[in-house]
Image: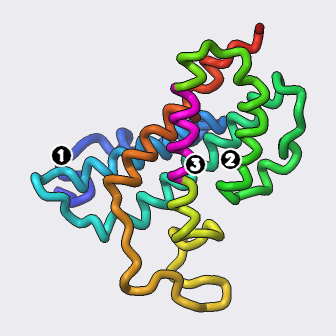
Amino acid sequence: MCQNNPHNADSYSFNANLGQNTNLRNYMSCYEKSVNALYSKILERNIPIDVDVYAIPMLFLMRHTIEIGLKINIKYLSQYSDKDYCLSKIFKCHSLSKLFDCFQGHFRTLIKYLDIETINQKLVLEKQCKELIEKLEIIDPNGDAFRYPINTEGNIIFDRETTINLLAIKNLFDEAIKLLKYTEDVVNVEG
């Protein structure tokens, strides 16, 4: 019995059809599911285990999920906002705060089409998304700290005292995902 296949599943079961994921929404969903799988691994026991082991890959996946979600929404909302807000540059941009500013430009232009309850809900989610982005950018301002232990100059990125509360970040991530997954569903562009 192979340790990579302890239940002796047919090896065909491990064939991943990468061609099924051909658009940004599918990629976002894959990254989000991976974040949730890693977080579930941490929660397998009553006391969170291996937080240090899973933190960096999970934070990378969270950051990338948010980046993709912002790009999806900018592209979608730009069709209705009649504004350019970064549309021509989004696929070259990896700064979450710049992408969020672009998203806000389009979103705020279209918010007038929403009912007051939806506006209030979206504004709360928007605030939480911004808070998540700010927290991620404090520890990873260039989008490389979750990918490599050193920066382009060869300096160690995190000092030994750098910590982050994954529960707080995961809670913000879950709320940010609501904003990014469902904005196009609730924006009534018909007016």
The x and y percentages for residue 104 are 71, 39
Q: Which mark is residue 105?
A: none
Q: Residues within 10 Å of mark 3 (few under 14, many from 20)?
A: some
Q: Distance between the residues labelled 1 and 3?
A: 43 Å
* 59 relative to 8 in the view: left or right: right
The residue most toward the bottom is 154
Residue at image coords 89%, 38%: 84
Q: For the C terminus, which image quadrant? A: top right
* 84 relative to 166 in the view: left or right: right
Pointer 2 and pointer 3: residues touching (CB < 8 Å)?
Answer: yes
For label 3, the residue is 130
The residue most toward the top is 190
Q: Is mark 2 on a helix, strand or loop?
A: helix
Q: How far apart are marks 1 and 2 (CA)?
A: 44 Å
For label 1, the residue is 7
Question: What amino acid type is highlighted by mark number 2?
Answer: Phe
For label 2, the residue is 100
Nearer-N-terminus badge (2/3): 2
Q: How far apart are marks 2 and 3 (CA)?
A: 7 Å
- Asked if residue 127 lies in the magenta stretch, the reply is yes
The x and y percentages for residue 137 are 58, 64
Nearer-N-terminus badge (1/2): 1
Q: Is mark 3 on a helix, strand or loop?
A: helix
Q: Quadrant of residue 83?
A: top right
Q: In which quarter of the image is residue 76?
A: top right
The x and y percentages for residue 64 are 57, 53
Closer to the observer: label 1 or label 3? 3
The x and y percentages for residue 140 are 56, 69
Q: What kind of colouring is applied to the model shown?
A: rainbow
Find the magenta span and give its range.
121-132
In the rendered image of this protein, does residue 168 appear above or below residue 124?
below
